[in-house]
Amino acid sequence: MKKYLKYSVFFLSSIPFLLISYKIFFNKLGPEPVKEITHFTGEWTLIFICLTLSMSPLKRFTKWNKWVSLRRMLGLFVFFYATLHLLTYIGLDYRFDWSPILNDVVKKKYIFIGFAAWVLLLPLVITSSQKMVSLLKNNWKKLHRLIYVIAIFGSLHYIWLSKTIFFKPLIYFIIILVLLALRIKIKSRNINYG
């Protein structure tokens, strides 16, 4: 059951990549192809961040432990789509011309925070294996709390990027804040009225 669930989630998570590959191959990206790929991969990165963050609250509310077993795979898809997003920017948009790229990172806050979010993903990917979980022990959990910072950075990247239309980026920001708030365990206190 668990194996088939993971295969199904992997397949579903791959669909956005297959879709954008289809659009590229059959030239269906519209008048601004690079912009289309950039926005597509960026938005799916945020969607996978939201999905990853939703696993623990779902486990808590449904009492079904299998949700947490999907978290690692979904987190790796965050990195996958974030890397495609970054490669589109530096490869297709700027043709690996590092001088204007570095200039953007320094001068444009949405580029800086987006790049920072990607850099913070690196240690999470490197330590995502079960072997690293055993090796790092309690420090693994502390390190992987970086996903909270990454989620905020990713949503701010989208908000600051959108110069005129703020509604959609704000929806993602609110969803992320709600998912982060749901992770706070409210401890009930026994009040003795005796």
Image (spheres, helix red, strand yellow):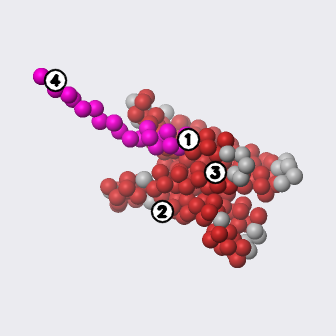
Residue positioned 28% across, 32% down in the render = 188
Residue 14 forms part of the magenta stretch: no
Q: Which residue is mark 3?
A: 159
Q: Position of residue 22 (x, y in %)?
A: 79, 47
Residue positioned 74% across, 45% down in the render = 19
Q: Which residue is mark 2?
A: 123
Mark before the other along the chain sequence, 2 or 4: 2
Mark before the other along the chain sequence, 3 or 1: 3
Q: Nearer the viewer, residue 148 or 10?
A: 148
Q: Which residue is mark 1?
A: 174
Vertical side of 108 occupied by 33: above or below: above
Q: How many labels, in total?
A: 4
Type of amino acid under label 2? Pro
Type of amino acid under label 4? Tyr
CA separation, marks 2 and 3?
25 Å
Q: Which residue is mark 4?
A: 193
CA separation, marks 3 and 1?
11 Å
Q: Position of residue 12 (x, y in %)?
A: 63, 40
Q: Main secondary structure of the magenta part?
A: loop
> What span is colored magenta in the figure?
175-194
Horizontal side of 131 relative to 125 (left or right) equals left
Mark before the other along the chain sequence, 2 or 3: 2
Pick out the residue farthest to the top. 194
Of tags 2 and 1, the one toward the viewer is: 1
Vertical side of 98 occupied by 45: above or below: above
